[in-house]
Amino acid sequence: MANTQLTIIGKPDCHLCDVAAGVIDGVIAELGSSAEVEVEKLSILDDPELHERYWEQIPVILVDGVEHAHWHVDPAALRAAILGAS
């Protein structure tokens, strides 16, 4: 089974980022061994390019490098994207 790379682009002390991370954690836990997911967190404060591109949209969620969602994460859509990428 291939690993799915999930990237969360946000910043510290971002309420929507915390909510998105919780949704992501819940979906990954629910999927269990049916999907291997690696989660990477990036901050727009650490990368000027990310800041320029995404500062108005955080959190931004990428699945295997492709933008999946911003602002809010729909659990069903994320689950489908992870399973489709695996």
Image (tube, rainbow, N blue to C red):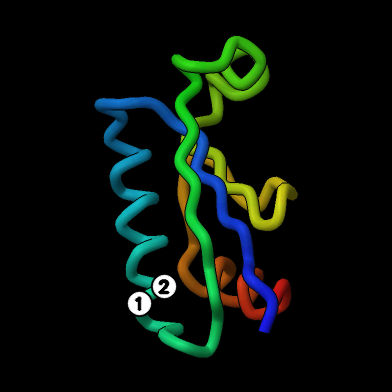
User: Label 1: which residue?
Assistant: 29
Point out residue 52 in the picture as x, y percentages from the top left corner: 64, 12
Q: Quadrant of the N terminus?
A: bottom right
Q: What residue sits 72% from the left and 72% below the top?
A: 85
Corner quadrant of residue 22: bottom left
Is 24 rendered above or below residue 32? above
Q: Nearer the viewer, mark 1 or mark 2?
A: 1
User: Label 2: which residue?
Assistant: 27
Secondary-structure class at tag 2? helix
Point out residue 37 in the picture as x, y percentages from the top left corner: 53, 68
Neighbor class of circle 2 (other Cα within 10 Å; few <14, some 14-19, many 20+) is some
Q: What residue sits 49% from the left and 33% below the top?
A: 42
Q: Residue furthest bottom?
A: 34
Q: Quadrant of the C terminus?
A: bottom right
Amino acid at circle 1: Ala
The foreground one among 68 and 43 is 43
Secondary-structure class at tag 1? helix
Amino acid at circle 2: Val
Label 1 with label 2: CB-CB less than 8 Å? yes
